[in-house]
Image (cartoon, helix red, strand yellow):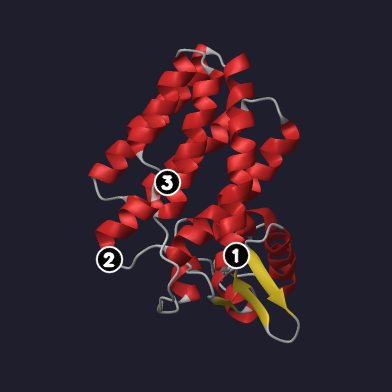
């Protein structure tokens, strides 16, 4: 029998988060423990703590007697997420400007360049991830640990919201699920000018614009095959 190294709980967590936020597991998808365990080549006892961790971060919903599903935010929850982001991100960008280094600005510039390249290549999963990274770097470098921690959770929730409420038409979905590069460049200009008031204003407008692009109508997604997404590891004996 071929030897293999079993995945750790953290590795399973990272792979599941990446798959959910890369839009390969749609909101509402059932996460059956047995199938996940088989796909990862581990026992169910290794999968359960991961699902609990994801539930604590509101990426997964755990329901008694029904199991786990990828979280499916309601319209009300979606509105609340954007409302809170508009409350905290202007403060985060003001804090960021007060201490941002040339290296920090270079990171943001690269995020925008990479996002534009990904969109031009039609790689929307990468573009969406880079868009979130732009906001997260501002938060992480702002030196405001509490708001930064809150935003990290909200960015994950935002990705689920965008998956749930983006228009089904491909081009509309592209526009709805990616923060506009032009808006990011405007934010970057205000950061370079060290203008916290203008940066805060642009951030509020940017988030409001993103929210207006959502379509609060039900959409049907085909349930993905968990084995095909996570498979590759031999089943544990």
Relative placement, left or right, of 111 versus 148 is left
Q: Nearer the viewer, residue 128 or 18?
A: 128
Q: Nearer the viewer, residue 95 or 233?
A: 95
**x, y percent for residue 180:** 36, 41
How far apart are labels 2 and 1 at the CA level? 23 Å
Q: Badges 2 and 1: C-beta atoms under 8 Å apart?
A: no
**Mark 3 Cα shell of 10 Å, populated few (<14), some (14-19), many (≥20):** some
Residue at point 53% right, 66% down?
233
Which label sits on residue 209? 3
**x, y percent for residue 162:** 46, 58
How far apart are labels 3 and 2 at the CA level? 19 Å
The answer to whether one can see residue 186 in this image is yes
| Residue beneath disc 1 | 76
**SS for callout 2:** loop
Which label sits on residue 169? 2
Relative placement, left or right, of 134 versus 93 is left
**SS for callout 1:** helix
**Mark 1 Cα shell of 10 Å, populated few (<14), some (14-19), many (≥20):** few
**SS for callout 3:** helix
Name the image quarter holding the N terminus: bottom right
Q: Nearer the viewer, mark 3 or mark 2?
A: 3
Q: Nearer the viewer, mark 2 or mark 1?
A: 1
Q: Badges 3 and 2: C-beta atoms under 8 Å apart?
A: no
**Mark 2 Cα shell of 10 Å, populated few (<14), some (14-19), many (≥20):** few
Chain-order first, disc 1 or disc 3: 1
């Amino acid at each position: 029998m071929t030897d293999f190294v079993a995945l750790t709980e953290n590795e399973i967590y990272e792979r599941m988060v990446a798959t959910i936020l890369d839009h390969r597991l749609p909101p509402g998808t059932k996460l059956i423990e047995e199938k996940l365990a088989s796909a990862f080549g581990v026992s169910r006892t290794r999968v359960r703590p991961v699902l609990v961790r994801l539930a604590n971060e509101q990426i997964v919903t755990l329901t008694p007697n029904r199991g786990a599903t990828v979280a499916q935010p309601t319209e009300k929850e979606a509105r609340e997420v954007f409302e809170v982001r508009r409350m905290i991100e202007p403060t985060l960008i003001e804090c960021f400007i007060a201490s941002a280094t040339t290296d920090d600005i270079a990171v943001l510039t690269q995020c925008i360049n990479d996002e534009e390249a990904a969109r031009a290549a039609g790689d929307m999963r990468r573009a969406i991830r880079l868009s979130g990274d732009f906001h997260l770097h501002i938060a992480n470098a702002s030196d405001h640990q509490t708001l930064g921690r809150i935003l990290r959770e909200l960015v994950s929730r935002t990705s689920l919201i965008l998956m749930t409420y983006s228009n089904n038409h491909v081009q509309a979905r592209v526009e709805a699920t990616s923060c506009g590069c032009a808006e990011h460049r405007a934010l970057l200009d205000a950061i370079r000018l060290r203008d916290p008031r203008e940066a805060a204003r642009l951030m509020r407008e940017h988030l409001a614009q993103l929210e207006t692009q959502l379509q609060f109508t039900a959409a049907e997604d085909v349930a993905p095959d968990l084995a095909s997404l996570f498979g590759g590891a031999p089943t544990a004996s």
